[in-house]
Image (cartoon, grey):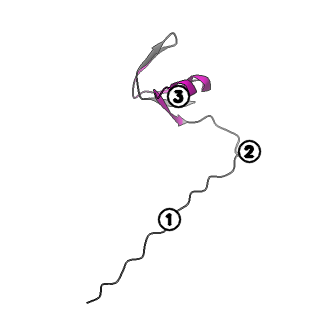
Amino acid sequence: MKIKMLKTSAGPDGIKISGGIYDVPDKEAKELVARKAAVIIEPKKIESASVEPFEAEVIPKPKKRKKNN
């Protein structure tokens, strides 16, 4: 899973610097996100056959009013 570090982290696996993008195992990514040290950029790819398409609601723009002179 790809993550972007929000804070610098150091441990036995190495150093991950704030602002850097890293590919880490799911478990490590979830721990870093839970500690607010990283955000997920690219979640693990899932087979498209088992995922429903995402639909977003779009609010229409209001119509422009005509000026009365």
Indicate which label's residue lies in the foreground, 1 or 3.
Answer: 3
Distance from the alpha carbon under mark 1 to that under mark 3: 32 Å
Amino acid type at image mark 3 = Ala
Mark 2 or 1 closer to N-term?
2
Q: Nearer the viewer, residue 69 or 12?
A: 69
Residue depicted at 64% across the width and 37% down the height: 45
Region in magenta: 16-41
Residue labelled with disc 1:
59
**Above/below status of 35 relative to 57:** above
Local secondary structure at mark 2: helix
Residue labelled with disc 2:
50
* x and y percentages locating residue 54 in the rendered image: 62, 52
* x and y percentages locating residue 69 in the rendered image: 25, 90
* Most distant residue in the right direction: 49
Mark 3 or 2 closer to N-term?
3
* Most distant residue in the left direction: 69
Distance from the alpha carbon under mark 3 to that under mark 2: 26 Å
Residue labelled with disc 3:
34
Mark 2 neighbour class, 10 Å CA radius: few under 14, some 14 to 19, many 20 or more: few
Q: Quadrant of residue 43?
A: top right
Judge from the rendering whether residue 23 lies leftward or rightward of residue 15; answer left or right.
right
Amino acid type at image mark 2 = Ser
